[in-house]
Image: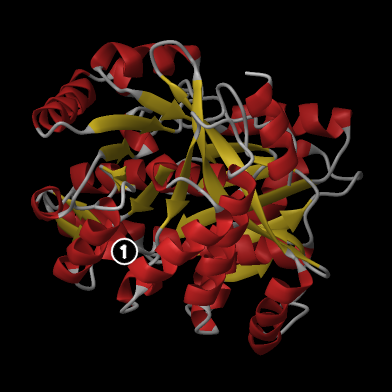
Amino acid sequence: MNAPPSCDPAPQGDALTGLGTRDTALARLAEWQTAGGSIHALLVGFRRFDAQNLAFGTAAGDAALVEVAQRLRHFAAAEIEGAWLAVRDGGSRFLLIANEPCSREAWQLAAGQLLAALARPIVTSAGTLRLSPRAALLRATDADDPASVLDRLGQTLETAMAQSGRRLAWADGEATRLGLSAAQLEADLIQALDRGEIEVVFQPQFACADNRLTGAEALARWNHPKLGKLGAGALFTIAERADHVAQLSGHIARLALQAAHKWPMDLRLSLNVTPADLAGADYDKQLAALIKQTRFAPWRLTLEVTEQVLLGDVTHAADVLGRLATQGIQIALDDFGAGFCNFRYLQLLPLHYLKLDRAMIDGVAGSARDLAVLRAIIAMARALELKVIAEGVESEAQRQLAAGEGCSHYQGFLRAQPMDAAAFREYALSN
């Protein structure tokens, strides 16, 4: 999964969600088939979405579709390293296509992760919607034309929607089973740490004002010997089932710190913190020891935490993060704007950065209300003496908007996509 990204950040035809349309998908599929390569697709629908509209009103239904579109793009940007396109295929159906080498099992794992993300409750002004997503999957062959790809997906999705217990269905008629059992995947992960199959890639971060490289966020990938490359979402889901999250997180931190020690001294490293990390009684001591072992300067490290990490015990999390902050480590609240935005976190946590969810930047230029919300968040951050990082910046217009509104840093595919440790070090030395 490692081709140049191909997600157009500007609205592509669907007025409600800003995603592409069916015509966009047909054109992109034809383009990719002409160029060659491996094409994967999945079509998502929601059972009884009409009932949600009746219960909460069409305005709430529309708000839910906008949230679905944002989650779809967020998932694709995080999990797919190759070229991809997200499309609203009419009504409450959404299409994701990707042009990248990927095993059947890996694509099915990705689809399962996406459905889990889309099934999370969606809070609207009219109430909380709980959607029931289904998906049809397909790996296109040379004999498939773009129209037949979409038609086969549509027919398969209709079949899946009619069966209450079936969440995934392959358009080729094969059973939705993985080549490896869940237990085998968990066993494989435990061994993967010793086999060197877990890789860390780095997403560069830049200063908004002058495009100067300022550091990178570490992201995990699993080079599975049978399934191919798996993204962080699938990796940590398997780790959670195997009760191996803390070990995996520590392994990733070690790899990232070892690599970042070789960077120029003015570059920062960002690491994601998991709930299992903060639940540990001595996470701060373990991380401090690891920093010392890898000879990495604590003041160059940023720890990124999300609301999901904090839901368990925010007071305990604040204590642990506070002890780390006294060592010079900086703390960022990640994906701000994607969840409930609990302002208590801003009161309790020793924060240095707010990292905006990509939805806070995407489409802001075309919405006065979205722009007003962005300005209010940045004004609040400024009053709290917090720097603001814009995530998911994919166009120069978005960078200029982020810079103009007061964001200090950004990351996204505008300047660079995630790269391995050697490639990032070379990139850093040349910038």
Quadrant assignment for the C terminus: top right
- Residue situated in front as seen by the camera: 323 or 338: 323
**Above or below — where is 394 with respect to 41?**
above
Q: Which residue is mark 1?
A: 309
Left or right: where does residue 28 sit relative to residue 94? right
At 71% from the left and 86% from the top, the residue drawn is: 184
Residue type at numbered disc 1: Val
Q: Quadrant of residue 91?
A: top left
Around disc 1, counting alpha carbons within 10 Å, would you say few (fewer than 14), some (14 to 19), or many (20 or more)?
A: some
**Above or below — where is 140 with respect to 391?**
below
The residue positioned farthest toward the bottom in the image shown: 183
At 68% from the left and 34% from the top, the residue drawn is: 425
Place of residue 366 in the rendered image (x, y in percent of width and height, measured from the top left): 31, 17
**Above or below — where is 294 with respect to 166?**
above
- Residue situated in front as seen by the camera: 374 or 302: 302
Q: Quadrant of residue 63?
A: top left
Left or right: where does residue 92 sit relative to residue 371? right
- Residue situated in front as seen by the camera: 201 or 299: 299
Place of residue 137 in the rendered image (x, y in percent of width and height, measured from the top left): 67, 59
**Above or below — where is 305 with respect to 390?**
below
Q: Is residue 112 visible?
A: no
Q: Secondary structure at mark 1?
A: helix
At 41% from the left and 18% from the top, the residue drawn is: 398
Place of residue 321 in the rendered image (x, y in percent of width and height, measured from the top left): 26, 59
Q: Quadrant of residue 175?
A: bottom right
At 57% from the left and 60% from the top, the residue drawn is: 254
- Residue situated in front as seen by the camera: 297 or 91: 297
Place of residue 69 in the rendered image (x, y in percent of width and height, measured from the top left): 42, 42
Q: Is residue 320 visible?
A: yes
